[in-house]
Image: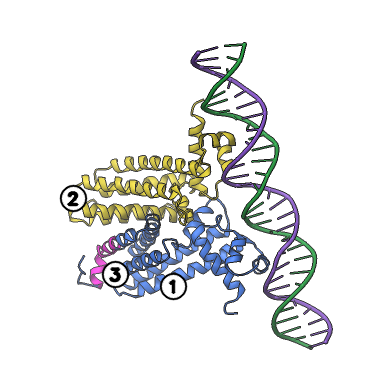
Chain colours: A yellow, B blue, C green, D purple
Amino acid sequence: MQTSTRDRIVIAAARLLQRQGYVGTGIKQIAQEAQATLGSVYHFFPGGKEAVAVAAIKYSTEEFATLLREALDSDDDPAGAVSACARQLAEELRESGWTDGCPVTAAALETLGTESEIQQACADALRGWEQLVRDKLLRCGFPAQSARELASTVISALEGAEVTAQVNRSEEPLQVAGRQLARLIRSYDEYEAYAPVLPPM
Amino acid sequence: MQTSTRDRIVIAAARLLQRQGYVGTGIKQIAQEAQATLGSVYHFFPGGKEAVAVAAIKYSTEEFATLLREALDSDDDPAGAVSACARQLAEELRESGWTDGCPVTAAALETLGTESEIQQACADALRGWEQLVRDKLLRCGFPAQSARELASTVISALEGAEVTAQVNRSEEPLQVAGRQLARLIRSYDEYEAYAPVLPPM
DNA sequence: CCCTCACTAAAACGAGCGCTCTATTTAGAG
DNA sequence: CTCTAAATAGAGCGCTCGTTTTAGTGAGGG
């Protein structure tokens, strides 16, 4: 067997959660998609549906972080790097037929009222991604406070733009957000010290 | 009776959809919350759950538009107006115990794969809100292209920041987004023509 | 050889889902 | 007062949900 049954369950659950949310995804559907039986699911995850979801979200979180890291590293210029993130997200979104958006948003919104571990996992995910952007900005010489605020805004805007892009079935919201976020980053004086020559708008 | 049964159903459905999403909200729960019986719900909405949801989303859309309009009108300065939007959203979010976020995001994400009317209603909502921001910017003298891109970015960023705020149970993401969006708007030359004196950062 | 134990398999349970159906009540027109 | 249509009321349908239970499989160590 190439991938273990447990891994197949986690991966299948991750995809389904991303597309249908927590409530909309059934345990039996996960088992079927993972080519596993219900017994196997409960064997590996005695905690039931919630335990599967938490594992899946953590997996998706790391997967998304890798994508973000690569996009951020693809350009020394922080403004260009953020644009690259938006471009990458737009591309994957289009290729998936507008279904594979942010892997935690849907699950997070559905479990807001509850105190489940899912909430915590989603909060950790957002914090982790924000940290990636912040580190990039810090490495580029931005002061701590500016880097923190910019990183938070970048993640929020990308998150929102992805939802908008999905609903409208168009890459434009993400492309526009990437362009405007780049402009926002360039508006900081610290940026000039890093890359004196402003790229053409 | 003060409000009609039909209205009570729509309002109750709107609140529940906002907090639990489409799949997570049951018809019986809507009826109970609205102090109506199941028979009444199907009497007024022969289309079933989806018809109730569409009506509820349209109601929420207008409600949210009113909030947005008031916040935008509260300040002649477009940057300040956008900040006011973020502040208003943060306040309502905190007061609701972080449950009453964007009224369409959850429902939109859950029904992405489908071709239901819910999708269309959510897309219309986002487009309408964006239009409000765009009109504000146009009134302030921004050129069409800039106004369009900025409005899209503002809505996306507020959307994403609201989700982040809900997950983290903190107003900060919204406040930061408001501040950075204001800075972005001020970075446009056209802004200077409108309000020559830049407010302190 | 057998025993163990991780793993697979499937049947079944109670609960709740969206929805249909049949009554019954209410309200206004003639 | 009568007739009618709108509105309310709730039992019950078929189905799926998450979970539990029980049985069966196969590989590795004594």
Q: CA distance from mark 1 to mark 3?
A: 18 Å
The amino acid type of the residue labelled 2 equals: Val
Whether residue A7 is visible to the viewer of this picture, yes or no, is yes
Is label 2 in a helix, a strand or a loop? loop
Image quarter in which the C terminus of chain A is found: bottom left
Read off the chain for label 1. B
Q: Residue B66: give its label.
A: 1
Residue A146 in percent (x, y) is at 23, 55
Residue pictured at 52% horizontal, 53% vertical: B110
Q: Which residues are magenta?
A: B179-194
Q: Is residue A73 magenta?
A: no
Read off the chain for label 2. A
Is label 1 in a helix, a strand or a loop? helix
Residue B19 in percent (x, y) is at 49, 60
Q: Is residue A170 above or below residue B185?
A: above
- Nearest the viewer among A113 and B91 is A113
Q: Is residue A26 above or below residue B100?
A: above
The amino acid type of the residue labelled 3 equals: Gly
- Residue carrying label 2: A197
The amino acid type of the residue labelled 1 equals: Thr
Read off the chain for label 3. B
Residue D8 in percent (x, y) is at 68, 72
| Foreground: disc 3 or disc 2 | 3
| Foreground: disc 2 or disc 1 | 1
Residue pictured at 22% horizontal, 47% vertical: A138
Q: Is mark 1 in CB contact (under 8 Å) with mark 3?
A: no
Is label 3 in a helix, a strand or a loop? helix
Residue pictured at 28% horizontal, 63% vertical: B179
- Residue carrying label 3: B80
